[in-house]
Amino acid sequence: MLAGLQTYFGIVLFLLFIGQTGTPTSVSPAVVKSEFIYETAPFPECHASTIAETGDGLVAAWFGGTKEKNPDVGIWISRQVKGKWSTPVEVANGVESPDKRYPTWNPVLYATRGTLVLFYKVGPSPSQWWGMKMTSADGGKTWSKPERMPDGIAGPIKNKAVELSNGDLLCPSSTEDKGWRVHFEITRDLGKTWQRTDPINDGKEFGVIQPTVFLHSGGRLQALFRSRQGKIVESWSQDQGRTWSKLIATSLPNPNSGIDGVTLRDGRHLLVYNHVLSAPGKWGDRAPLNVALSSDGKTWKAAVVLETGPTQAEYSYPAVIQARDGKVHILYTWNRKKIKHVVLDPDKLVLRDMENGIWPAQ
């Protein structure tokens, strides 16, 4: 009788958890919290979220509007105040005149030493957009006037910038005007002056964009990329991101969807991505959404399934950071309707082997 009651209440709690989060999220001991940033908003669609931690707490941003690429798409911000997310506020748009407005794209937040920087893009399409930035000195409450970046500088294209041991802020970037090609942009003064590397690929053997950067011992850097080849692709740098090794495919699948990762303070590397097999050159499903962990950036272990499906759903474009308290915060697009926030305790992740790149059965 007691066992039956325990089973019953366990099912009820699981169903309540599903109801609160929208879809079944992996019931893992590592999942501390799962919530939406907002329930209702003045825009019907959203995408490409980003997150940063300031001295005043967490700040999230994304683009929202009628639909991606529509001129009414702007950059929206929400701040976490006393554990609750504030009502979204539009802080940037592509208005150039009373009769000319462009869509905005892919905001990226970066916080350092009392300054919060918002990088974003404006333009008719990813092949024609240009970089913009704003700064905040009060944790995202108020913002400076938008500033256009120098020609050829877009800032971090989707994923966060990484501060290196030599003081450089390395911004992972890419272009889509002459094939999908990756380059890196470097600043030491939060975007007042810039250096830019040459493209590290020709866009032919591998069409890759939207790098995420991991920090390894000895100053080595590893970048993983979204690709058109059905696999997550990697490259390595030995010289603080100035030059990069030849691109090679990893064992992890990629259905032509954005990824993001972070090197944890214990040295392990955490990656959020859609573990979906798809044919090269084809767009695959953007469900499920997965978390994998690696100690060396080469061998990856299955950790958590954030969203399971159905396959026609979209759980995509993750952004991930590790906060000062050690918890991992993940944002992602939830069916283009909401932005979801999941908090993980990395010490409670249960890891399983992936044989031949196949995610293990639950």
Image (spheres, helix red, strand yellow):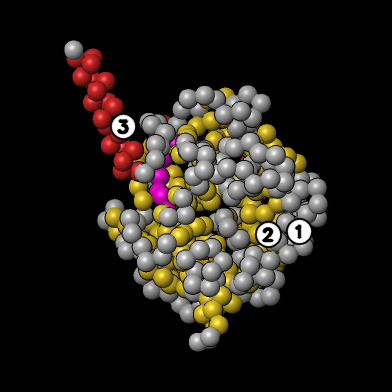
| Above or below, 241 relative to 77 | above
Q: How far is the residue under mark 2 from the one under mark 3?
A: 41 Å
The count of marks equals 3
Q: Which mark is residue 179?
A: 1
- Amino acid type shown at disc 1: Gly
Q: Quadrant of residue 248?
A: top right
**Residue found at the very far top of the displayed protein:** 1
* Region rendered in magenta: 339-346
Image location of residue 30, percent across then percent down? 40, 34
Query: Relative to the observer, which residue lies in front, 40 or 317?
Result: 40
Q: Which residue is mark 2?
A: 174
Image location of residue 168, percent across then percent down? 62, 60
Dots 1, 3 in contact, CB < 8 A: no
SS class of the residue under badge 2? Answer: strand
Q: Quadrant of the N terminus?
A: top left
Is residue 213 in view? no
Neighbour class for label 2 at 10 Å: few (<14), some, many (≥20)? Answer: many
Image location of residue 188, percent across then percent down? 61, 66
Predominant secondary structure, magenta span: strand
Is residue 354 in view? yes
Q: How far is the residue under mark 2 from the one under mark 1?
A: 10 Å
- Amino acid type shown at disc 2: Ser
Give the left or right position of residue 106, taking residue 128 as reference: left
Q: How far is the residue under mark 1 from the one under mark 3?
A: 46 Å
Answer whether residue 126 is magenta in the image. no
